[in-house]
Image (tube, rainbow, N blue to C red):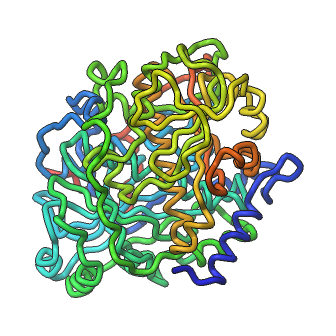
Amino acid sequence: MSHPDARAELIAYHRLSSHAPDRYAPGPGHLDWATQPDPFRRYAGAPRIDLPEPEERLGVPAAVLAGNQVPAQPLEPATLGRLLRFSLGLAAWKQWGESRWSLRCNPSSGNLHPTEAYVVTPGLPGLAPGVHHYVSLLHALEHRATLARPEALTAAWPAEGVLVGLTGIVWREAWKYGTRAWRYCQLDAGHALAALACAAAALGWRARLLTAFGDAQIAPLLGLDRADGHGEAEPETPEALLWVGPEAPGQEPDPARIEAAFRLAGPRWQGRPNRLSPRRREWPGIAEAERAARKPPTPPVAPLSPATGPPQPAALPRDHTLDAGALFLQRRSAVAFDARTGLPAAHLWALLDRLLHRPGLAPWDAVPWPPRVALALLVHRVEGLDPGVYLLPRGTGLEGRGEPVEGAPPHLGLVRLAPGDARHFARLASCHQEIAADGCLAFAMLARLEAALDEGCWWYRWLHWEAGAVGQMLYLGAELCGLRGTGIGCFFDALVPQALGAALPAPASDLYHFTLGAPVEDRRLRTHPPYEGLAGWRQAAGGRGAARPLA
C-alpha cells in the first residue's frame, strides 16, 4: 500500500516531467559540453580482474530467445564474462571526424548509460569472493569488497549462481534531459534487465529478478550506503537485484538471511569512484521522485502462471541463422528509416508473440509479475495488414473495444481500434520526429500508472522496467527481421491516451514509444570493433587498480 504523500509526489513528478505540444518538461535546452559526464565509472584503488578476451560469438542460435533450450554452461569467470560482455559490454565504436564514442549491447537514452552493474559472489574458481564492479570499457571486474569470512555467505547461498546488482546514476541522463531524466533511467534499467536475461538464456542459465529485496537491503550489498564511498562523486541509487546462474532457486532467497550473512562475512571495501563531471545541476522533482519510489522489503511476487498460449513463439526469419552473440552485438538504434520498406504480417505476429509473458522464456523471468504494459500499434507499412491503430493488450486487462484482426493468431488478442493513415499522428505524438512515421509501424506503451501506485510507489519504477524490457525485445526482434528499431523517450504524454480513451476500459498513461523499419545508414560514420585496443586500454588504466589476469 502506498503512502498518500509519496503517491502524490510521484504523480506530481510525472506531470512535471511530461511533454505537451505547448510545453516541454524542464530541461537544459542546450548541451553543456564542459560538464558532459564520463560514460565509465571506475574505482581507484580497487584491484582489477581482467576477464578473458571478449568473444564475438556464443555458438548458440538466436532461436534460444524463442524458447529453444541449450545446455547450461558452467559458472566460471569465463562464462560470467560472456554474460556481462553480451548484455552490458561494448558493441562497437563509432567515429565522425575526430569524435569517437562507444555503443553498448544494452541501449540507453541518448547513449548516456546511467546503469552500472555489480556482481556479488561467495567465490568461484578463479574469482575471489566479494563484490565486483563491471567496467565495460576494459571488460574487467573491480574488486570492490573482499570477504573476511566468505563461508558465512556460502552457507546462505541458495543455488549455483551469482547476484547481479544494477544501479542508476541519474546525473548521466539529467545532464541532457533535465527533469524527465529519471524516467529514462528506469527505462534503461528495464533494457539492462532484459539484456541480462537474454544473455543468460544463451548460456543456458536463468535470470530472475529478486522482488522481495528493498532498496535499503540492496544498497549495503553493493556499497552504495557508505558515506566514505563516493565523496564528491555523483551518487548511485540501487535499482534491481537479480539472481543469475545455471540453477534457479526454488524460491526467492530470503533478503534478511542474505543481508545477515553478508554482514557476518565481514566485507572490507576498497576503491573510490571517479567523479564524472566537474559540476552538476539538480533538476526539480527528481530527488522527490527517487525518495517517493523507494522500495521497502515486500513478499516476493508470485511466479508467472503456466502460459495459456502456444509453448513457444513462432520463428522469426533469422532465428536459426544468426548467432545469439552476433545478434546482441549488432543491435543498434536507427537514426532514420527509408519510408518505403514493409514488414510481412506473419513476421509481425511472431514479433508480437515474443512480447507475451511465458515462464522460462527470456526475459520474462526477469520481469516476473503479470504483464501491465499494453501496446498501441500505429501501423504504416505491414504487408497484409491495413494501416491504422491497433492494440496488443498482453493480458493486462487493457483490452481495447475494437475489431479482432483477421489472420492474427487469436491468442495475441490483437484488435483494430481505427483504420486509416496514422503517420501524421505517430510523428506528432513522438515530438514531431519523422522516424516515428517513416518506419513499418510505431508503438506506444500504455499502463494504468495511477492504479499501480495504489499497490506501492515502487511500481512507478517497475512499470518503466517492464516497458524497457518490451523495448529490448522489439530491438532484438527487429534485427531478426532484417530491420532495425529505435526507442523514443520524447513524446507528448497525453496525446495517445486521449486519442484512445474511449476505446480503453480504464485510464492509461503513456510510458515509452518505439518504432522499427529499414534503416538509412549515415555513411559519414565509421564503425570500429568494440575491443580492438583492449590491451592498450588495460595497460593505460594501470595505476592503483593494477591488473590481475585470470588464470
Residue at x 41%, y 64% (from the top left corner): 240
In the rendered view, would you say 49 is above or below 491? below
Horizontal side of residue 79 vs 217, given as left or right: left
From the viewer's side, name the closer residue of 475 and 410: 410
Residue at x 20%, y 29% (from the top left corner): 59
From the viewer's side, name the closer residue of 207 and 149: 207
Residue 48 position within the rendered picture, expressed as x and y whole percent measured from the top left: 31, 59
Asked if one can make out residue 530 in the rendered structure from this viewpoint, the answer is no
In the rendered view, would you say 433 is above or below 549? above
Residue at x 29%, y 55% (from the top left corner): 305
Asked if one can make out residue 391 in the rendered structure from this viewpoint, the answer is yes
Residue 427 position within the rendered picture, expressed as x and y whole percent measured from the top left: 75, 32
Horizontal side of residue 462 vs 183, given as left or right: left
Residue 14 position within the rendered picture, expressed as x and y whole percent measured from the top left: 70, 63
In the rendered view, would you say 186 is above or below 531? below
- Where on the picture, by quarter, is residue 341? top right
Residue at x 69%, y 69% (from the top left corner): 11
